[in-house]
Amino acid sequence: MDEPQTIFERFIARPQSWYVRLLVIIIYLTALVVAAAVDGVLGELRDLFTLRVLLLAPTVSIYIWMVSPVMARYGQQVERSLRPLIKLDDEAFLQLRANAAIIKPGYEILAFVGGMVLGVVVTLSSGFDQLTSCLGAYWLLTASLMYGLLVWVIIVSVLSTRLINRLHQVIGPFDILDPSPFEAVGKQSLLLALVFIGGITISFLFSFQPGNLASPYFWGEYAVLVMLVLLIFFLNMRPTHRLMAAQKKAELEPLQRQIYQYSRKLQDRLTQNEPVDELPGVIQSLSVFEAYLLNAPTWPYNTAMLRALVFSVLIPLVSVLARILVELIK
C-alpha cells in the first residue's frame, strides 16, 4: 500500500535522514557565501533585508522538501483508515489504487520545468538587475528551483485527489454514528492547512516590512490568505462530507417516516378511544434514535481540529509582530 506511485513520492516525499537534510542546508548557505565572496560583496550580507531576500527561496524549498514526507504519510493513513469500509478484496483494491494514484511522469516533469520557467520570469522582473553577477545567479537558480517545487507539489496534490475520490466511491455501508474511520481525512485537511500557513509565515518573516502594517493591501492580502486556508481545509474534506451526509440522510428519512406512521396510529387510536398498547414507547425510542442521528456529524473534523485551525491562521501575523518587537528591542 505504501509503495511510491509518482516521481514526487520517490524523490521529494521520501523520508530522508537528518544528515542529508543538513547537507542540503549547508550547500545552500555555502553557495550563498561563495557567490558573495566571488563578487566581493560579502559585507553586504550583513544587511538583514538583503540576506532575508536571498534566503527566502532556499528556505521555502527546504520547507517543502521537509514537510512532503509528513503529508505523504498522512495520505497513507487516510487509505489505511478507509480500507475496512471498502468492500473489495486486496487484489481489486490494489488495482483500483494503482489506476487512480499513478500520475504520468511527463506531467510531473512538465510541472517542475514550467514552474522553473515561471521562477525565472518572476525573478527577472523583481529587481534582479540590482544584484551582482554571482549573487544574481544564486538568486535566479534558487528562485527557479523554489517555483519548480511549488508548481510540482501543487499539480501532484491536485491530481492525487483522484485516489481519495475513487476510494469514496467504493465505500460500503457504515455507521454514521461512528465517524472515527473518517477522522484521518480531517487530520489530513488540518495538516494541509497548517502546511500552507507555514509557507505564509516563512514568506512574511523573510519579506515583511514594518511599514506594511499601515497598508490596506497587506490586510487585504492577509484576509485572502486566511480564506484560502479555510478553503483548503474544507475542500479536502468535501468528498467525505458528501458521503457522510448521504449516509445520514439515508438512515434519517426512513426513520422519520416510521415515527410519522406510528404517531398517526397513536393519534387514530386516541381519537377512537382504543388501547395505545406499546405505541408511545416505540415512538419515544425511535425519537431518541432520531436525535442521535440528527446530531451525527457530516464533516470528518472535531472541535479540537477546528480550534487548532482558527488559532493557526493567526500564526503569520503573530510571527511578524514578534519579529518587529525583537528588532525594536535591539
Image: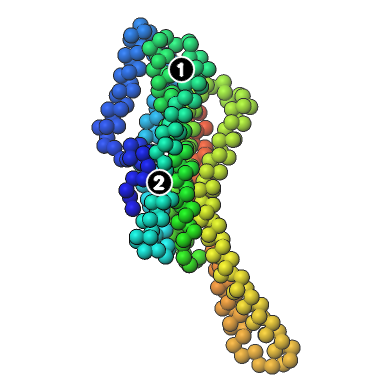
- Viewer-proximal residue, 108 or 133? 108
Disc 1 residue crowd, few under 14, some 14–19, many 20+, Cα 10 Å: some
Q: Amino acid at mark 1?
A: Phe
Q: Is residue 298 left or right of residue 265?
A: left
Q: Position of residue 115 (x, y in %)?
A: 46, 29
Q: Secondary structure at mark 2?
A: loop
Q: In percent of the image, x 46 and y 65: which residue is there? A: 172
Q: In percent of the image, x 33 and y 9: which residue is there? A: 38
Check the image and report above or below for 279 versus 152. below
Q: Residue 181, which numbered label?
A: none
Q: Residue 102, which numbered label?
A: 2
Q: In percent of the image, x 42 and y 65: which residue is there? A: 87
Q: Nearer the viewer, mark 2 or mark 1?
A: 2
Q: Amino acid at mark 2?
A: Ile
Q: Position of residue 324 (x, y in %)?
A: 49, 24
Q: How many marks?
A: 2
- Picture quadrant where residue 10 is located: top left
Give me the C-alpha separation between circle 2 and circle 1. 43 Å
- Viewer-proximal residue, 329 or 121? 121
Is residue 325 visible in this depiction of the protein?
A: no
* The furthest residue to the top: 40
| Image quarter (top left, top right, bottom left or bottom right) of the C terminus | top left
Q: Is residue 78 left or right of residue 219?
A: left
Q: Upstream in the sequence, badge 2 or badge 1?
A: 1
Is residue 4 visible in this depiction of the protein?
A: yes
Location of mark 1 (residue)? 49
